[in-house]
Amino acid sequence: MQIATDGLVLRQVKVGEADQILTILTPDHGVLSASARGSLRLKSKLFSACGLFCYSEFTITAGRASYFVDTAAVKKVFHGLGRSVEAMALASYLAEAACVLAPEPPESAELLRLLLNSLYMIGENKRPLPLMKAIFEMRASCQAGYMPRILACESCGRYDGCDFYLDTAGGGLLCADCAASHNRVPNLDAGALYALRHICLADDAKLFAFTLSAASTKRLGRVCERYFLANLDRGLKSLDFLHTVLAEPAPASPTVPSGNEPEV
């Protein structure tokens, strides 16, 4: 059986002199692992379309136990990702996360759209990298069915006007007073809470349409990473390297928030 599909190359594994195994995220077939024979040869018709983070149109043959790339034509190359080690490290982290999530259709189409838009924003330097990381982590969590309950405090119903605490294990929200009664320290200031709600609830076309102060971004980033990893239930090797190049330690315990207002 032959499959014609668009797809984003998430991972390459070299096999022999000129072959490679590609991990491809597709909208209609989920994540596929396919052999691209001879694709590392410069004269190969597959060479330009089978590179890492290439969004290409593939023709793939399904064998008894594996897939084989027959043809590939480039649709989009994110050249801007090569502008810095930090941008490439973040792209690699998002790609590894997508491999682990490995959604089936139609969720795979949603994740592909999110990843393509994220890579574009990263490559074009449209938003700070820590903010892009947080947006992807929380939106991907929501797409996977793990949307946190962020509309109001679960104990008293308070919507805003103070700092809040998001339980990154359970997904519930508490205002500062209710958090204190549960021996919890608020981990979201006003700006981070606004951004969190926007990421979870905004339409795709408006997902990236906000800015955030550095202090609020830091708090949002800690919460989104903890929440994402808790639902993923495993670590990612690329995350350690990303923390290193961004000069940020992995989030430890919640800190006292700053109270910055959202910049929109």
Image (spheres, rainbow, N blue to C red):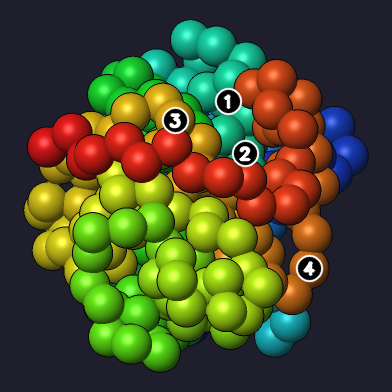
Question: Which residue in the protein does label 3 denote?
Answer: 215
- Asked whether the beta carbons under mark 2 and mark 4 sit within 8 Å of each other, the answer is no
Amino acid under disc 1: Met
Q: Given this view, does label 2 or label 3 mark the residue nearer the observer?
A: 3
> Could you tell which of marks 3 and 4 lies nearer the N-terminus?
3
**Quick one: SS at disc 4?**
loop
Q: Given this view, does label 1 or label 3 mark the residue nearer the observer?
A: 3
Amino acid under disc 2: Ser
Quadrant in which residue 109 is drawn: bottom left
**Quick one: SS at disc 3?**
helix
Amino acid under disc 3: Ala
Question: Which residue in the protein does label 4 denote?
Answer: 234
- Asked whether the beta carbons under mark 2 and mark 3 sit within 8 Å of each other, the answer is no
Quadrant in which residue 158 is drawn: bottom left
Residue name at image x 74 percent, y 82 percent: 65
Q: Residues within 10 Å of mark 3 (few under 14, many from 20)?
A: some
Residue name at image x 64 percent, y 22 percent: 246
> Could you tell which of marks 1 and 3 lies nearer the N-terminus?
1
